[in-house]
Amino acid sequence: MLRIYQLLIVILLPVVVLRLIYRSIHEPAYRDHLVERFGWVGDYPTHDVWIHAVSAGETIAAEALIRSLLEEGRSIVLTVTTPAGREAAHRLFGPSITLVYAPYDVPFCVNRFLRSMAPRAALIIETEIWPGWLAALEHRGIPAALINGRLSEKSYRRYARAKGLIQAALQSLALVGCQSEAHRERFLALGALESSVQTFGSIKFDAGLPPDFQEDVRRTKHRLGPEPVLLAASTHAPEESFCLTAFKVLKSQYPSLRLVLAPRHVHRANGLVDDAVSAGFKAKVTSQNGLLSDVDVVVLDEMGQLLTWYGVAQAAFIGGTLIDHGGHRPTN
């Protein structure tokens, strides 16, 4: 079954690349470092650990783990899938790790990556079950573990359609560390070995605030002024229009209130400024120089700043909940 899966992935690879190029129309960073996704990552010495985190949320969740490994003197290659994840990793860890995009799950990409990086162990964050990766790791005798594992009911149903393939992949893992008992039960139902599946809770609770957090909050409050702030975080279209409508009602009762829109995808920020202006508000993006005290609506257009805005706001709404998306966690 693995061979059929790998053949299908190879056949679909041009479609995947075209989708990536399409996404780069709105987010040009998707065009950068494209060859890394095919396993061309340069020549490096052996790494102690390969850690894979999809995007910014998983990268931030893994921060405490990565810093602990670095303090032990471990060499780390961190792979991500999105530009947001890459930016977050670069900001958090700089040159202390090797940072590249994850290889596509086809043999020639995965094997080229593993030859170059030569990891001694692999840690995969949350829900990335790639049969080709895990088969290649098992073939090379490299132990792998799934950390901070979560498996929603929706993801479980999707994986269950190829249970034979997924079961083999899960059974190759030395450890499946789950966030909750509900997630553990779903992994077991997919065929993971009971002896390898454990519940540890979420590693996001191990993360602390960065040392410059309070200073960032103070500086941001200075730009914004003393007025109360309502934050709408990790929003998707059309949630922002709902927020603007609700804000208009709140503004009539609390004239000094400010709304901060933090879209899940920052390339939408300028369009949201236009939407806010069309709704009758003064609006700016956060990257504009100077004070923000003369506007009603602030739109976050910079990566890695959301945590600071949680510290600034008096109340927060978290997106992905007014649409059929499943919601986000505050740390995303």
Image (cartoon, rainbow, N blue to C red):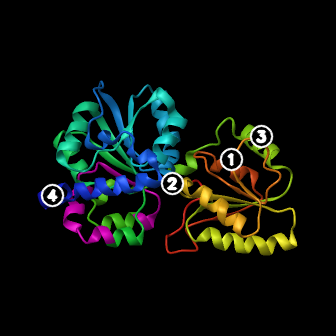
Q: Amino acid at mark 3?
A: Arg
Structural distance between the alpha carbons of marks 1 and 2 = 22 Å
Q: Amino acid at mark 1?
A: Thr
The disc, 1 or 3, on the residue closer to the chain's N-terminal end is 3
Residue 148 in sight from this viewpoint? no
Foreground of the two, 18 or 191? 18
> Residue 14: percent from the left, percent from the top?
23, 55
Q: Quadrant of the C terminus?
A: bottom right
Circle 1 residue = 308
**Residue 319, located in which quarter of the rendered image?**
bottom right
Residue found 35% across the figure and 35% down from its top: 49
Side (left or right) of 328 relative to 121: right
> Residue 206: percent from the left, percent from the top?
56, 46
Q: Amino acid at mark 4?
A: Leu
| Secondary structure state at the residue bearing disc 3 | helix
Q: Identify the mark at residue 51; answer none if there is no mark.
A: none
The disc, 1 or 2, on the residue closer to the chain's N-terminal end is 2
Q: Is residue 247 magenta?
A: no
| Number of the front mark, 3 or 4 | 3
| Number of the front mark, 2 or 4 | 4
| Secondary structure state at the residue bearing disc 1 | helix
Structural distance between the alpha carbons of marks 3 and 4 = 53 Å
Circle 4 residue = 2
The disc, 2 or 4, on the residue closer to the chain's N-terminal end is 4
Mark 4 residue crowding within 10 angstroms, few (<14) / some (14–19) / many (20+): some
| Number of the front mark, 1 or 2 | 1
> Residue 295: percent from the left, percent from the top?
79, 56
